[in-house]
Image (cartoon, grey):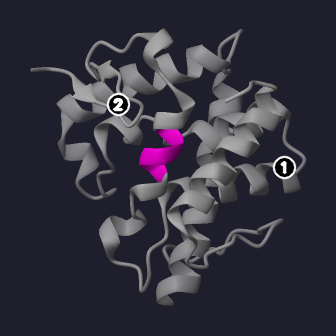
Amino acid sequence: MSSILTYTGIMFDPMAPERDKIDPRDIAHALSMLCRANGHFPHFYSVAQHCINCKNEAEARGYSPRVQLACLLHDASEAYLSDITRPIKPLLTAYLEAERVLQNAIYEKWFSPSLSEEELKLVSLVDDDVLYCEFLRLTGMRLSDTEPQMSSVPDLETRDFSAVENGYLHVLSMMTREEH
């Protein structure tokens, strides 16, 4: 069986994603239930909350609404594939390819024209900077010698799963003017 059953009851094949089966409710729900850092932070902090923080940081930096939305969606493939820690991910070439195909399908659902290389670089920069902030504030660890200049203060508090899920959906809805 190559399909998974999603929260909304969709049979979804992550290896052959169909845009019409990508449901924001599945993304928000699953990401709100996935813990960052493979559960090694001192308290539960979800991938969805991280994505909201990335969107907020992009907004605080004055980046375009497209980059802000891409920051919100940048880990959406993990709703279907799960999260893999950074040191291990490069070793899993099949996972990387599945993630690339799925993330591109997710981006194609919300972006026309496609995101530019420059926009994707900004998303990656925000993701890295928020990651640095998360590790510094939650573990005291500095991930590099250069601390990024943050334009927002990420919310790293423990939040109720459903509140984060609803918050993610609300932000997505406001940004895309979709009803969910």
Q: Residue at x 40, y 10 (%)?
A: 18
- Mark number for residue 105? none
Q: CA distance from mark 1 to mark 2?
A: 26 Å
- SS at mark 1? helix
User: What type of secondary structure mainly makes up the magenta span?
Assistant: helix
Q: What residue did someone put label 2 on?
A: 99
Residue 59 position, x and y percent, is 84, 49
Amino acid type for the residue under numbered disc 1: Glu
Q: Tell me the residue at 62%/61% (across/down).
A: 163
Residue 129 location in percent, x, y?
63, 62
Look at the image and tell me whether residue 128 can be seen.
no
Q: Residues within 10 Å of mark 2 (few under 14, many from 20)?
A: many
- Residue 180 seen: yes
Which residue occupies the foreground of this view, 180 or 92? 180
Q: Could you tell me residue 93's position as x and y percent? A: 20, 33
In this figure, which residue is indicated by the disc labeled 1? 59
